[in-house]
Image (spheres, rainbow, N blue to C red):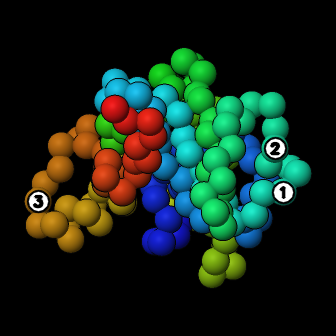
Amino acid sequence: MTQDQTKTSTFILPIINLQLRSELIDSYLGVDSSPEDFGKSIYIEVANLSEELVRPDIDEIIDLGGTYLLKYTFTEKEYQTFVYPFIHGKYSKMNKEYTRTFFPLYEFFDGAAHPSLFQKIFDRCSTLKEHWEKRLGVTLNSKAEVWTKMLELENTFYFNQK
């Protein structure tokens, strides 16, 4: 996980499986015409517009004069199974097939395989829960998520607001 990108780039962008290399600047959940639209689309800011990024499922390409925004609209299934749980900080409720497909199960260090941070987040790992309890000096509910909820202001792109 990178600290300089939004949680949207980390947890939601992989859904659309764009072949991004160095082009990615960041991505944001969209609010297109009204607040009820929040999260129905994603805007991906890229430095260069390569042929691989121009696909039929990209709804719109916006030239910002030096960078570009690619707009992708989620299907209702994608919204319900990935985006909605993400918006509400319910990482453990995100579609398991998605989390197992797009995020590493293991990290390798010290000569051994260890569950990745992503899988600890999605599975509400007890060691991660204990880490936060110790760090925050609180006892968390057994159903508590073990990662922070996204911050709407940092993860949102407002477009065509009236």
Q: Is residue 29 left or right of residue 59?
A: left
User: Label 1, on which residue?
Assistant: 50
Q: Residue at x 64, y 63 (%)?
A: 65
- Label 2 sits on what residue type? Val
**What label sits on residue 144 in the rendered view?**
none
Disc 3 crowd, CA 10 A, few/some/many (<14, 14-19, 20+): few
Q: Position of residue 25 (x, y in %)?
A: 60, 65
Whichever of callouts 3 and 2 sits on the residue coming sooner in the sequence is 2
Q: Examine the rendered structure and indicate whether residue 26 appears above or below residue 70.
A: below
120 or 102: nearer the eye? 102
Is label 3 or label 2 in front? 2
Q: Give the residue at the far top of this rendering.
A: 76
Q: Are marks 1 and 2 in contact (CB under 8 Å)?
A: yes
Disc 1 crowd, CA 10 A, few/some/many (<14, 14-19, 20+): few
User: Label 2, on which residue?
Assistant: 54
- Determine the CA span between mark 3 and mark 2: 48 Å
41 or 133: nearer the eye? 41
- Determine the CA span between mark 3 and mark 1: 48 Å
Q: Is residue 65 left or right of residue 26?
A: right
User: Label 3, on which residue?
Assistant: 138
- Label 3 sits on what residue type? Val
- Label 1 sits on what residue type? Ser
Q: Examine the rendered structure and indicate whether residue 100 appears above or below residue 67.
A: above
Whichever of callouts 3 and 1 sits on the residue coming sooner in the sequence is 1
Q: Are marks 3 and 2 in contact (CB under 8 Å)?
A: no
